Amino acid sequence: MYTIDSTYHPPYVGVFLLIFSCCVYAVIQVLKPVDLKRSSGKRRWSMPPGPPGAPVLGNLRQMMKARRGGALSFNKWLASLIPYGEMATLHMGSKTWIVLNSDRVVSELIAKRGKITNERPHMPIASDLVSNGKRTVIRQEEEWREGRRVMHHLLSGSNLKVYAGMQELESVDMLRRYLREPKLWYSHHFRYATSVLYRIVMGYPLHKSKAELDAYQRVTIEFVSSINQSYVDFFPSFSTLPHVLQPWRSYWMQMGAFHRRVFQQWWQPISAAVRDGSAPPSFVRDVLLHPDMRYAGDDEEAMYLATSVMAAGGDNTRMTMNVFIMAMVTNPEAQARARAEVDRVCTKGDSLRLPRMSDMSEMPYVAAMIKEVLRWRPTVPIVPPHQLTENLEFDGKFIPAGTCLLINSIALSNEFEDANKFKPERWLQGPPGSGKTIPNFWGFGGGRRVCVGSKVAEQALFIIFARLLYCFELIPDGPIDDEKLNHQSLDEPFPVRATVRSDGHAALIEGEAAKYEASFSTFATK
Ligand code: HEM
């Protein structure tokens, strides 16, 4: 009799299972982080230790969870990587990160080996969709180089003196706002930082409506938050799927389109003025659109470069000013010491004058506060990834090209003695023969990608620190936790009372402001 064998499978089922398994295997191989793939030579990769992670996602969810918890929780997560040593390996989806936890390894890898640690990883969301592939800070090396050349030209050398004049001018307006509306101290920081950058880049005082400024601020915050936010940036191969299989695209594309519209509104009047010959000297007129400079990018790239410089410079300066205020209200001795230094230079008997940029060499303690503010509560807790372009042998490890290196500012700050204390004197040169040297400083990142605006930032911060200390007493106006900076708050981030020191100081501010009033930027509040 004919019987049916229940274990019999027609041959095509076997073939299907084989193909399916091969596909799963191939997908897993593609998605694997680079150090978990086989090395092409005989040697196996040898990576620094790191926290255990989940299958496929690795440590990605740990970071995402920390980010969702806010700035403090993210900083705590960065601190939790310190016990793994000077370098900690993380598997972030398809990416391998090595987080750099010490000054020594940052000097060795980011500064000394800049030639092979200069690339940025491909970020299909933050870079391609949100930034049209054109925001300099996360652009890949080949497209980035030309923009860097012109930015360097803009932000160094004799231009710095011209910018010092702009910074002094805008800071007088800020002092008067502090005097008249002390409760809005934090919004005066936004105004100062943004209008200085606008003047430098576009050449004009800033006259914008509240709606325009709100849109600009939203763009900055959205862009910064988009970096390392989408899982797709950690699995970039998903971006090669057909568009119908990428449901996330429309959300990010809409965001990118909104950013572009805002940029165009800011850019078009300036670029028109350059073309009709009516624009004043500026980065846009003299560097980006001047025929002799031979900037290789087109108008669209010029627009992204100009607005990227404004955004990168403005918001970091604003946040650092807030940290300075936090340092002052929680460290009255440092405030008094710095003020004594400024008074020595600017007060002669009954005669008062505002500090100037040229006073910097006579105010070393105030100047040292710039580094200490950035060390104490780093404005950029983790520097955007630098990607290795060659395999690297270092400290007995063998690390594959494609691995990302990230400076952990929280760990670097922690290497200092009494790390949680605000002590600007760490950055002061010792007397001759004392053997005291100034430590390395990484608050602006490092290597070839180092912040191109660091000199402009130092000037912007110095003049504000010195002038605020000269004119105002700063105290807490309620309970304060010095780790809670609330950088993204639109209201007062922490309670502060700023009181003018004397009638003489108030008269000085009003007198100086009256002289320059016609040139100030105007900020609509409605
Ligand atoms: C206290 C204020 C500032 C801080 C803490 C800061 C920090 C940084 C950091 C950490 C980077 C990335 C470096 C790296 O990848 O290694 C960066 C890049 C950059 N910064 Fe700053 N920055 C500040 C102010 C400024 C200012 C005032 C400007 C403009 C005048 C500016 C323009 C830029 C630009 C354009 C980039 C991207 C550079 C490139 O693509 O090559 N920054 N900044």
Image (tube, grey):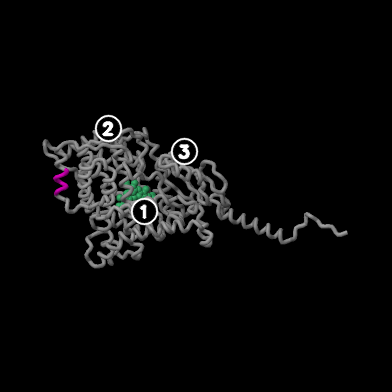
Q: Earlier in the sequence, mark 1 or mark 3?
A: 3
Q: Secondary structure at mark 2?
A: helix
| Residue lying furthest front | 526
| Quarter-of-image position of residue 256 | bottom left
Query: Which of the two marks, 1 or 3, is nearer to us in this view?
Result: 1
Residue at mark 1 = 219
Foreground of the two, 361 or 136: 136
Residue positioned 52% across, 57% down in the render = 238
Foreground of the two, 46 or 80: 80
Quick check: is the Cβ at mark 1 less than 8 Å away from ligand 1? no
Left or right: where 167 falls relative to 9: left
Say above or below: 438 vs 30: above
Viewer can see residue 337: yes
x, y (%) of residue 72?
41, 39
Residue at mark 2 = 332
Viewer can see residue 371: no
Residue 412 is a magenta residue: no
Neighbour tally class for label 3: few under 14, some 14-19, many 20 plus, Cα within 10 Å: few
Query: Which of the two marks, 2 or 3, is nearer to us in this view?
Result: 2
Q: Earlier in the sequence, mark 2 or mark 3?
A: 3
Neighbour tally class for label 1: few under 14, some 14-19, many 20 plus, Cα within 10 Å: many
Q: Which residues are magenta?
A: 509-514
| Quarter-of-image position of residue 302 | bottom left
For marks 1 and 3, give the CA distance: 31 Å
Query: Residue 80: which disc?
Result: 3
Query: Which of the two marks, 2 or 1, is nearer to us in this view?
Result: 1
